Image (tube, helix red, strand yellow):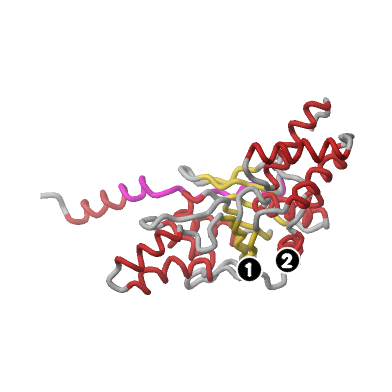
Amino acid sequence: MIDDADSLARIAAALERISPTPAAAPDFNSATAFVWHVAPDRLSPVAQVNRVDLGLLQGIDRARDILLDNTRHFARGLPANNALLWGARGMGKSSLVKAIHAAICAEGHALKIVEVQREDLPSISRLLTLLRAAPHRFVLFCDDLSFSHDDQHYKSLKAVLDGGIEGRPENVIFYATSNRRHLMPRDMIENERGSAINPSEAVEEKVSLSDRFGLWLGFHPCTQDDYLSMIRAYCTAHGVEVDPDTLRAEAIEWQATRGSRSGRVAWQFFTDLAARKGVPL
């Protein structure tokens, strides 16, 4: 019979082998943007962030100003809210987060942005432990955040939004984008209400997650005027010259073939236009 002490030692050794190795802090001065990876845990610096200039984001002035002020307050060490950017696809939600980070850095603030994938949310407490000890301020960014009815990842997110007994680190704020205001499909919300033993409790735990964001910024489908303004702004910024009437006609035809208008569609049209004009981007 194996000694109990020997058994416990074997179990402890096995648990140590399968537990994640604590991530070493990177050189935070090497970059302003990082991506969080797991297995093994690590923060990888991003040398060149894929983003557009803040001034090129058209038709979202209110959301831009609110999020810019909130981020500026946070960078200065003042109180600030976690933010949920929700709404129509392709209207610049993730572009706004990255552009505002660049704008704040340009003002002289040493603000870092860390991208976290939704599937890596269970590791978020380990990331917070790493960032808590760092002498910098961080925006945690999760793009296209949403949950299905049987998805338990949302529980891990509470560590960022509520912080548990330790509280959210003072030097960390969380920004997320989603097509859904409540982070889960409406039909699943209705199914929970209709099939659960206690409908209100079944829905409340998941729906209330979005209530934990201090800022809700809605993004709605753009008008034709906004769509054309975006394209004209891109033309001006990149020096593409084209007859206004021709530009308008081609831009409207492009969005008609796509069946939608958005900032993403405007950029796709402009990419095609720039190529035809021989202008590199």
Residue highlighted by disc 2: 66
Q: Nearer the viewer, residue 74 or 30?
A: 74
Left or right relative to 91: residue 232: right
Q: Which stretch appears magenta?
A: 14-30
Name the residue rendered at 54%, 70% in the picture: 212
Q: Quadrant of the C terminus?
A: top right
Name the residue rendered at 83%, 27% in the picture: 277
Residue 215, labelled with which disc?
A: 1
Where is residue 194 drawn, in percent x and y? 33, 67
Where is residue 100 drawn, in percent x and y? 74, 55
Q: What is the secondary structure assignment of the residue under circle 1?
A: strand
CB contact under 8 Å: marks 2 and 1: yes
- What crowding class fits label 2: few (fewer than 14 Cα within 10 Å), some (14-19), or many (20 or more)? few
Whether residue 132 is visible to the viewer of this picture, yes or no, is: yes
Left or right relative to 143: residue 238: right
Q: Could you tell me the amino acid type at mark 1?
A: Leu
